[in-house]
Image (tube, rainbow, N blue to C red):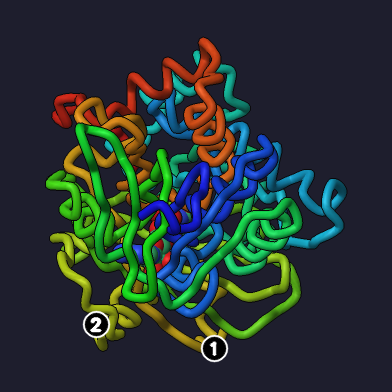
């Protein structure tokens, strides 16, 4: 063991969370190794994300983390010279029935209490923001102009590049297959290639987090739930915000779509019931189901051609919120798992927080987040808009 190379922190997983975490840890001057089972950065759920980024949640932890993420995403190009395709188009949640109007208005009170820039617009106001919405039956909706989108592929690569520039090492095709804990303290990490010595591990293994947890006897409540997405051909800009419809219909609970800065419409649906498991084969049900719903609220999309569909994994927790924090029973084990459908937008803010957690430099505000996302919470709460 003494000859094993030593790292201050070993991050498991080079995805939406692991890559920014490595960057902010390296910024603290720490000696970082990221171990990734895939052949390059972002090959897990990260590249399956459609790029939506919002701070307008109902949970204070996610709000705080995503407000910081938006600051980072929106200034990345000017700070580091890499264009990650940030676009401040906002988010619109539409209401076509009194029930959704009430839900969104109730939520708005909470969101406004956190100082979020979000408002209710009546149908006339909403049609000014999204002129192509079907006006028939439209009651209005919420609009949060400071939310936006970016490219998950470019962003994860940007964090990776900057982390490497600061000295972080990324080892690919090296799945973590063992973890040595001695007298309650993390000592080493094993891969099929070799052993690395360390005092601190961050489990950022996404939908595979429980397998990593089980290497130390932890049973983490993180389960993969597969979601499907698609992208169209590129067309001239006609849609600014992400449009979300939360009305449940048979087979799905909500759907959302936006026009990426490069012109394509990217869209997703939330299956109901969940599709538990690791199956990522595309289905024949997805496109007919989602396109019918999209055309109902935006008939103009009828002639746009779909280029590709794909399916990826949400790392789900029982209450829909991430699990972040130190494990009391294992000195040197930090969890950053269970990002559900929001790991891309949480990544930068959470990466910074993980760097403070690892260096015992957390601030008062961090404690509120860590309490909310604690691995020791009861997991009974449910956020209104997951
Ligand atoms: C269709 C779809 C659309 C989405 N849209 C959005 C969106 O608009 N906005 C948003 O914020 N989020 C979105 N998400 C969710 C987002 O993709 C995830 O929440 C996020 O990528 C999870 O980040 P992560 O770092 O935890 O996991 P990942 O990005 O999957 O990273 C985990 C990494 O760990 C690696 N790994 C696993 N086991 C091991 C091991 N034993 N050893 C070493 N490495 C290991 C994996 O290979 C993987 O690269 C979407 C997801 C899907 C499927």
**Left or right of 315 on screen, residue 156:** right
**Callout 2: helix, strand or loop?**
loop
State whether residue 136 appears in this view.
no
Residue 289 as seen in the image, left or right of residue 361: left
Q: Is residue 284 above or below residue 253?
A: below
- Label of residue 305 in the image: 1
Do callouts 1 and 2 mark residues in contact (Cβ within 8 Å)? no
Classify 10 Å Cα crowding around label 1: few (below 14), some (14-19), many (20 and above). some
Closest to the observer, 219 or 181: 181
- Residue at 64 percent across and 61 percent down: it is 160
Q: Quadrant of the C terminus?
A: top left
The residue that appears at 75% across and 75% down in the rendered structure is 236
Specify whether tag 2 is near ligand 1 (CB below 8 Å).
no
Question: Looking at mark 1, is its residue's CB closer than 8 Å to ligand 1?
Answer: no
* Element carrying mark 1: loop
Q: Name which of mark 1 and mark 2 comes first in the sequence.
A: 2
Indicate which disc residue 266 carries: none
Residue 307 percent across, percent down from the top left: 53, 89
Q: Mark 2: give few (<14), some (14-19) or many (20+) Cα within 10 Å.
A: few
Q: Quadrant of ligand 1?
A: bottom left
Label 1, label 2: how many angstroms apart (C-alpha)? 17 Å
Q: Which numbered marker is on residue 285? A: 2
Whether residue 318 is situated above or below residue 282 in the rendered picture: above
Q: Position of residue 156 (x, y in %)?
A: 60, 61
Residue at far top of view: 364
């Amino acid at each position: 063991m003494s000859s094993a190379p030593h790292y201050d922190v070993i991050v498991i997983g080079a995805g939406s969370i692991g890559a920014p975490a490595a960057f902010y840890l390296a910024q603290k001057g720490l000696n970082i190794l990221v171990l990734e089972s895939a052949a390059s950065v972002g090959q897990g759920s990260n590249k399956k994300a459609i790029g939506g980024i919002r701070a307008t949640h109902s949970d204070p932890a996610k709000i705080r983390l995503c407000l910081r993420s938006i600051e980072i995403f929106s200034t990345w190009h000017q700070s580091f010279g890499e264009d990650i395709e940030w676009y401040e188009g906002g988010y619109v949640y539409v209401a076509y029935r009194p029930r959704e109007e009430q839900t969104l208005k109730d939520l708005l009170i909470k969101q406004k209490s956190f100082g979020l820039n979000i408002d209710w617009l009546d149908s006339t106001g909403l049609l000014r923001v999204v002129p192509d919405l079907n006006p028939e039956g439209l009651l209005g909706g919420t609009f949060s102009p400071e939310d936006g989108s970016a490219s998950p592929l470019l962003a994860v690569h940007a964090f990776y590049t900057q982390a490497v520039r600061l000295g972080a090492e990324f080892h690919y095709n090296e799945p973590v297959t063992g973890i040595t804990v001695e007298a309650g303290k993390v000592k080493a990490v094993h891969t099929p290639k070799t052993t690395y010595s360390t005092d601190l591990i961050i489990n950022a293994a996404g939908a595979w987090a429980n397998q990593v947890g089980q290497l130390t006897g932890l049973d983490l409540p993180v389960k993969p739930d597969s979601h499907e997405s698609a992208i169209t051909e590129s067309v001239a800009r006609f849609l600014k915000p992400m449009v979300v419809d939360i009305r449940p219909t048979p087979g799905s609970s909500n759907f959302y779509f936006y026009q990426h800065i490069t012109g394509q419409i990217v869209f997703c649906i939330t299956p109901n019931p969940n599709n538990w498991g690791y199956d990522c084969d595309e289905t024949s049900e997805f496109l007919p189901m989602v396109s019918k719903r999209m055309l109902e609220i935006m008939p103009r999309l009828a002639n746009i051609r779909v280029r590709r569909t794909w399916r990826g994994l949400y790392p789900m927790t029982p209450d829909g919120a991430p699990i972040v924090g130190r494990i009391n029973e294992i000195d040197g084990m930090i969890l950053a798992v269970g990002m559900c459908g929001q790991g891309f937008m949480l990544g930068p803010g959470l990466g910074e927080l993980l760097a403070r957690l690892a260096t015992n430099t957390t601030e008062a505000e961090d404690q509120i987040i860590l309490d909310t996302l604690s691995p020791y919470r009861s997991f009974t709460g449910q956020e209104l808009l997951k």
